Amino acid sequence: MVKIKDPAGIKKLILSDDLEHKRIISISAHIDHGKTTTTDYLMRRAGLMSDAAAGQALMTDSDE
């Protein structure tokens, strides 16, 4: 399980109407070419994922 630094703050930001602080990204690549790794890196750099979780869990790699 990945520990997010401030889940309540992230939820509030996601649900807010303030688009100034939101970024929408799209990463296209063939299967097994690093999309999840790249996305997790960006989330870690943005402070949404702890450095300890980096490489341990794949936040965007899910079958849900």
Image (cartoon, helix red, strand yellow):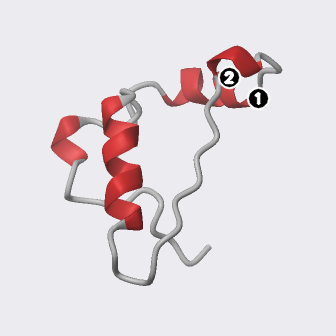
Is label 2 in contact with label 1 (beta carbons under 8 Å)?
A: yes
Q: Nearer the viewer, residue 27 or 12?
A: 27
Of the residues shown, which amino acid type is indicated by label 2? Answer: Lys
What residue is drawn where x is 56% and y is 78%? 63
Residue 27 visible: yes
Q: Amino acid at mark 1?
A: Leu
Q: Give percent across and percent down for residue 37.
A: 31, 60
Residue 30 position in % (x across, y down)? 45, 81
Measure how far apart labels 2 and 1 are at the Cα level. 5 Å
Q: Which residue is mark 2?
A: 12
Give the secondary structure at mark 1: helix
Q: Tell me the quarter of the image containing the C terminus.
A: bottom right
Q: Secondary structure at mark 2?
A: helix
- Locate residue 47, reporting x and y percent: 36, 27
* Residue in view at x 34 percent, y 75 percent: 33
- Residue appearing at x 64%, y 40% in the figure: 24
Task: Give above or below for 2 relative to 4.
Answer: below
Q: Is residue 16 left or right of residue 35?
A: right
Residue 3 at least partly seen? no
Answer with the quarter of the image where residue 61 lies. Answer: bottom left
Mark 1, residues whose alpha carbon is within 10 Å: few (<14), some, or many (≥20)?
few
Q: Residue sitting at 76 percent across and 29 percent down?
A: 15
Q: Is residue 14 left or right of residue 47?
A: right
Residue under circle 1?
15
- Checking the image for residue 30, the label placed there is none
Q: Residues within 10 Å of mark 2 (few under 14, many from 20)?
A: few
